[in-house]
Image: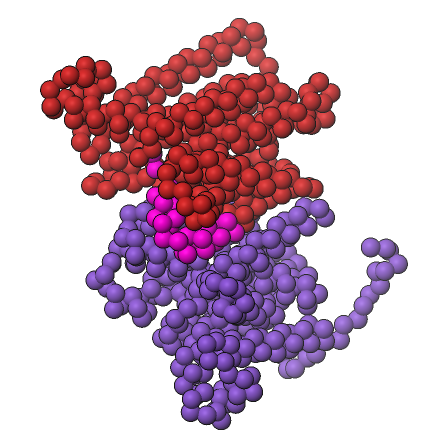
Chain colours: A red, B purple
């Protein structure tokens, strides 16, 4: 896609395009619903659609077999599916926003050290304060994620590096390696935190209850509201700072709000389900090829695509290595890295 | 720089038969000093421990005139570790110097190019998959061999994926990042699905450590490094003109694609050998060439000096980790603590210029 080729379609063409995009959004929602339904049914104990329905809506005083199904559906599958949808939306939108604000096609929450920051915060807190409940250390993961993201952002935007994909990627990688070594140092001295870390680290949807999901969802919703409020000015920012200022955008405010939104979205998703890299990057590129550069369309597309992709990866992870499970974060990486390599190969990151 | 500053500076050249090179007293002096420093740190690393031995006695023992007691402690207990530090440091330093020169980017290092990640994934795979059954094999050379194969395989994969009508530094780094992400994902998954005791062992190896080196592991890394350094020394003469750009190098009669391929292969093998002996010690390959470049006042990373700086860094970090810190930590933690801020400094400096 070339951003320089600006077409100026006739008004009727514009409404046509708008209708097409709205239809696309509707189709994505439909796909998401189907994926969610499949996610409820697939697992070590496969359920038929009827059983899923019963598990969701049957009255509490049903017979023994049904209560088992109720147990599976309501305490395992539903939280997992909800989390995948929430985290997917957050990561997808976070990824597309990051690319918009940095004007950097390589930007991704996973590549920005956000994950490593969260890991480090988690082990430090477990080792130092002795917390064992995920509900407690999730908040520290959130803070660590935000701090690392801001540091990498800041480092890569000092001086001339602001628009350079390589600078951002390397700053992220450097901070990640540094934090990972520190994390290992803590984890090695404390087996309890090592044990907690290795599960959290693989980006799993499983085993997270609604006590974690609701607060995380609240953060994601807050991030979404902020994100949606900045979309028009983000479009203008992408014309260049000078042009945007001339058109009446308060650049400092817009950037700050944007970074706050990204930190909320990425931090919350990372805190809940562990590090998931490449999802935002993939989704943002696919969304851009579907909608073009208009962020008012691109961002909703990216959010829905992110949710669908994360759900599908989670389902695939449940199926491929039975009786074990491949965590969703691992599946996303295995899918995302080749995607990234193809983008590199086709020269998509040249625009520095 | 003022226009008046630019005047032709004559640097004396030396010609011996077919070979000619530029005589740079500063570079030679710095290199000799670094060699001395590396030897000093090496001896210190042997001297410090639960049973301290004086430096003079260490040196006497090394040349074969020590007492019986010292002989045992120095040659059997401490020598493998100190030698591993030296060899791994040199291998990582030279490997980093090569990758940074080829990619023409101060931040390209084997860590970033995914070589250490691949070696780590292979080693963790061996530890977790084989479990207790292959414990005897593991304790000797199995882990090293797996790391070597993993590092080499990943290096070749990155090279092949980045190849598109020649190698371009930018593409090489980005593809390396992608491949190391895959390796990281595999490692994480293996760790999550393994037994907790295996995980602790794998994790200790993954951060890079010189603990409990045996002569077997060190010998493998030593011979690999010596052999590869010989190859690098032969090719290095051809490499110098390539800093002027591919076209000029071709005009000067250098087959740049071939030279670059051979050098990169050597860099990958050196890094893999280093990782197989000490685990993926982070940042040494990144920091050493840059420090050497600044010390030697060269425009590009000097190979020999980079290797020596690497040795000083790694052995020094190991010394600090063992003796100066209240808790004993793997050497990788110390190099990361030093290397991370250094990387940040490099980035900020490159951007501010």
State the image coordinates of residue B177 (x, y, percent, origin top left).
Answer: 48, 47
Start and end of the magenta stretch? A177-205
Decide: is A39 above or below B283.
above
Q: Can you give x and y, in whole percent of width and height, for residue B88 in the image? A: 48, 68
Residue visible at 58% across and 63% down? B288
Q: Nearer the viewer, residue A249 or A76?
A: A76
Magenta segment: does it hold A245?
no
Q: In the drawing, does residue B168 fall left or right of residue B12? A: left
Name the residue located 44 percent from the left edge and 68 percent from the top edge: B210
Pick the front one: A13 or A34? A34
Above or below, B319 against A64 in this view is below
Residue at 60% across, 53% down: B341
Can residue B261 be seen?
no
Question: Which picture quadrant has residue A164?
Answer: top right
Report if residue A204 lies within the magenta region. Answer: yes
Q: Main secondary structure of the magenta part?
A: helix
**Residue B348 seen:** yes
Q: Position of residue B125 (x, y in %)?
A: 31, 55
Left-right relation of A265 to A188: right
Q: Nearer the viewer, residue A196 or A299?
A: A196
Q: Residue furthest top?
A: A12
Q: Is residue A35 above or below residue B297?
A: above
Q: For the N terminus of chain B, give its image quadrant.
A: bottom right
| Residue B59 screen position, x and y as percent | 53, 86
């Amino acid at each position: 896609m070339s951003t320089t080729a600006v077409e100026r379609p006739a008004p009727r063409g514009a409404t046509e395009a708008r209708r097409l995009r709205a239809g696309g959004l509707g189709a994505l929602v439909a796909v998401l619903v189907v994926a969610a339904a499949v996610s409820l049914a697939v697992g070590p104990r496969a359920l038929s659609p009827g059983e899923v329905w019963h598990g969701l809506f049957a009255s509490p005083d049903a017979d023994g077999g049904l209560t088992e199904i109720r147990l599976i559906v309501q305490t395992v599958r539903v939280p997992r599916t909800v989390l995948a949808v929430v985290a997917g939306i957050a990561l997808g939108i976070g990824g597309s926003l990051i690319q918009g604000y940095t004007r950097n096609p390589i930007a991704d929450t996973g590549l920005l050290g956000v994950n490593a920051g969260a890991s480090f915060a988690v082990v430090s807190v477990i080792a130092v304060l002795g917390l064992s409940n995920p509900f407690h250390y999730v908040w520290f993961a959130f803070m660590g994620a935000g701090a690392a993201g801001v540091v990498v952002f800041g480092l890569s935007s000092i001086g001339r590096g602001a628009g350079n994909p390589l600078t951002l990627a390397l700053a992220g990688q450097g901070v990640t390696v540094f934090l990972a070594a520190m994390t290992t140092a803590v984890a090695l001295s404390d087996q309890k935190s090592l044990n907690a870390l290795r599960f959290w680290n693989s980006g799993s949807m499983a085993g997270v209850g609604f006590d974690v999901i609701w607060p995380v969802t609240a953060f994601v919703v807050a991030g979404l509201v902020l994100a949606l409020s900045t979309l028009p000015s983000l479009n203008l920012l992408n014309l260049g700072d000078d042009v945007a200022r001339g058109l009446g955008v308060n650049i400092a405010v817009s950037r700050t709000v944007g970074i706050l939104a990204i930190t909320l979205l990425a931090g919350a998703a990372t805190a809940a389900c562990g590090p998931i890299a490449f999802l935002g990057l993939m989704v943002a590129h696919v969304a851009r090829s579907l909608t073009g550069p208009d962020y008012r369309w691109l961002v909703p597309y990216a959010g829905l695509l992110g949710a669908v992709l994360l759900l599908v990866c989670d389902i695939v992870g449940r199926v491929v290595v039975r009786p074990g499970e491949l965590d969703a974060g691992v599946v996303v990486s295995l899918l995302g890295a080749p995607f990234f390599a193809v983008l590199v190969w086709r020269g998509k990151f040249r625009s520095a | 720089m003022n226009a008046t500053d630019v005047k032709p500076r004559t640097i004396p050249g030396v010609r011996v038969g077919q070979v000619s090179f530029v005589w740079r007293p500063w570079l030679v002096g710095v290199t000799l000093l670094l060699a001395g420093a590396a030897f000093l740190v090496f001896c210190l690393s042997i001297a410090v421990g639960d049973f301290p031995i004086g430096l003079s006695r260490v040196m006497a023992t090394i040349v074969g005139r020590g007492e019986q007691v010292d002989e045992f402690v120095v040659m059997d207990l401490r020598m493998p570790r100190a030698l591993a530090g030296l060899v791994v440091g040199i291998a990582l330093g030279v490997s980093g110097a090569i990758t940074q020169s080829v990619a023409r980017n101060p931040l390209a290092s084997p860590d970033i190019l995914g070589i250490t990640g691949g070696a780590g994934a292979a080693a963790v795979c061996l530890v977790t998959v084989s479990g207790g059954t292959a414990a005897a094999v593991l304790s000797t050379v199995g882990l090293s061999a797996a790391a070597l194969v993993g590092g080499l395989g990943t290096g070749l994969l990155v090279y092949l994926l980045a190849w598109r009508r020649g190698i371009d530094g930018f593409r090489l780094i980005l593809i390396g990042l992608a491949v190391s992400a895959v390796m990281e994902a595999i490692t994480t998954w293996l760790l999550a699905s393994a037994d907790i005791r295996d995980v602790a062992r794998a994790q200790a190896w993954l951060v890079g450590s010189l603990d409990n080196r045996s002569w077997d592991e060190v010998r493998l890394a030593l011979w690999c490094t010596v052999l590869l350094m010989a190859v690098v020394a032969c090719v290095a003469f051809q490499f110098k003109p390539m800093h002027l750009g591919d076209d000029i190098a071709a005009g000067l009669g250098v087959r740049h694609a071939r030279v670059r391929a051979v050098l990169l292969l050597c860099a990958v093998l050196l890094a893999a050998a280093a990782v197989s002996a000490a685990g993926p010690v982070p940042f040494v390959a990144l920091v050493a060439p840059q420090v050497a470049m600044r010390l030697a006042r060269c425009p590009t990373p000097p190979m020999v000096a980079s290797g020596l700086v690497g040795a000083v860094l790694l052995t020094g970090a190991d010394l600090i980790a063992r003796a100066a810190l209240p808790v004993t930590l793997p050497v990788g933690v110390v190099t990361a603590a030093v290397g991370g801020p250094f990387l940040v400094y490099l980035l900020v400096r490159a951007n501010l210029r």
